[in-house]
Image (tube, grey):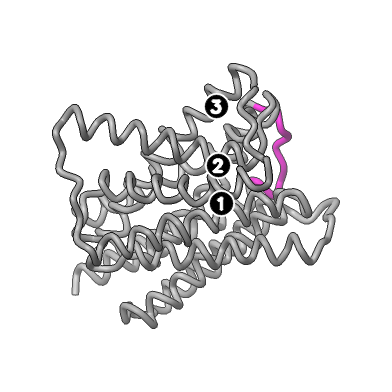
């Protein structure tokens, strides 16, 4: 039963993160830019959580070892993930960037094997391959605009996110309350992006109300809810399984794009969705077999 709860957390996380490109697009239309959106997203999330901790008198003290790890998580891996992915959009299509970013389920599975000695069951390997193929089919390859800089940035975002996921699976991080963990990750990510925004003069706060609302929703849904549910899923089902479930994220983005942004439905959407759902069903079947042993 606990594992199924972990699967539900992973699905909730994928949906929360899947909303991110839709909300970001709305924010951009209203006058925001990538650096501003990333900074405010994390800063607002940290403020909301800090306010909750003060009202509820929650103890947010952590050990020195945990502090070192959350600084690495927020200031390095998560901030780097967001920066490289958002900047890659300036050089290649969002679809192509998504393809390269979603190398992370395979990277996480490999890293989890090396770091945590997770077993590489044949079904898990097949599941990873199917999920990657699903993402590849989802975005399609029509009107590709190639740029080696964009490709490298998108690949880097997937690799950075892989290290973030693996670090969340560390025993020191697992012992932390997920709300507290989300606060520190958000705080250090905003702390890291602030000087970059100041130096490059990229922080732009004059924007329409729609942009502000979209950024607040990004902070609450795609940051607080997304990070909390993802951290909980990693605690229960492990980094590699959580990463495979994360491939539901592009499905969420594409479906919501069709509904809210009037983007077209395509055969690649249906085929990609089927491949990703198949990868998750294979993983679930594998977990049931392992539980029965």
Residue 227 shown in magenta: no
* Callout 2–callout 1 Cβ contact below 8 Å: yes
- For label 3, count other residues whose C-alpha is less than 10 Å away and answer few (under 14), some (14-19) or many (20+): many
Give the residue at x 32% y 53%.
Answer: 231
Q: Is residue 33 above or below residue 216?
A: below
Secondary structure of residue under mark 1? helix
Secondary structure of residue under mark 3? helix
In-front residue for pair 224/18: 224
* Callout 3–callout 2 Cβ contact below 8 Å: no
Where, quadrant-wise, is the C terminus in this rendering?
A: bottom left
In the figure, residue 282 lies in which quadrant?
bottom left
Give the residue at x 60% y 49%.
Answer: 196
Q: What is the C-alpha distance between the residues marked 3 and 2?
A: 12 Å
Q: Which residue is mark 1?
A: 82
Q: Which residue is mark 3?
A: 214
In the figure, residue 52 lies in which quadrant?
top left
Residue 264 shown in magenta: yes
Lower sequence index among marks 2 and 1: 2
Give the residue at x 67% y 23%.
Answer: 30
Residue range highlighted in magenta = 261-269
Mark 3 or 2: in front is 2
Lower sequence index among marks 3 and 2: 2
Measuring from the top left, give residue 242's x and y in whole percent.
38, 59
Secondary structure of residue under mark 2? helix
In-front residue for pair 150/240: 150
- For label 1, count other residues whose C-alpha is less than 10 Å away and answer few (under 14), some (14-19) or many (20+): many
In-front residue for pair 204/109: 204
Q: Which residue is mark 2?
A: 38
């Amino acid at each position: 039963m606990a594992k199924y709860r972990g699967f539900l957390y992973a699905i909730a996380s994928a949906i929360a993160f899947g909303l991110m490109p839709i909300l970001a697009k709305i924010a951009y239309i209203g006058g925001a830019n990538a650096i501003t959106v990333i900074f405010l997203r994390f800063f607002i999330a940290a403020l909301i959580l800090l306010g909750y901790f003060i009202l509820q008198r929650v103890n947010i003290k952590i050990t020195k070892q945990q502090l070192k790890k959350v600084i690495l998580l927020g200031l390095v891996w998560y901030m780097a993930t967001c920066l490289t992915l958002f900047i890659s959009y300036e050089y290649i299509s969002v679809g192509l960037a998504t393809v390269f970013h979603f190398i992370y389920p395979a990277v996480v599975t490999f890293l989890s094997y090396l770091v945590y000695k997770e077993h590489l069951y044949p079904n898990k390997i097949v599941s990873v391959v199917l999920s990657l193929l699903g993402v590849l089919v989802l975005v399609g390859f029509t009107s590709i605009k190639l740029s080696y800089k964009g490709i490298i940035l998108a690949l880097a975002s997937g690799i950075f996110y892989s290290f973030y996921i693996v670090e969340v699976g560390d025993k020191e991080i697992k012992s932390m309350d997920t709300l507290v963990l989300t606060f520190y990750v958000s705080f250090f990510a905003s702390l890291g992006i602030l000087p970059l925004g100041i130096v490059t003069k990229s922080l732009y706060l004059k924007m329409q109300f729609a942009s502000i609302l979209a950024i607040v929703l990004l902070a609450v849904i795609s940051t607080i809810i997304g990070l909390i549910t993802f951290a909980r899923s990693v605690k229960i089902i492990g980094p590699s399984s959580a990463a495979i479930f994360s491939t539901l994220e592009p499905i969420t983005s594409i479906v919501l794009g069709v509904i809210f942004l009037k983007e077209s439905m395509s055969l690649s959407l249906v085929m990609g969705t089927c491949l990703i759902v198949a990868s998750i069903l294979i993983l679930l079947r594998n977990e049931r077999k392992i539980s029965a042993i």
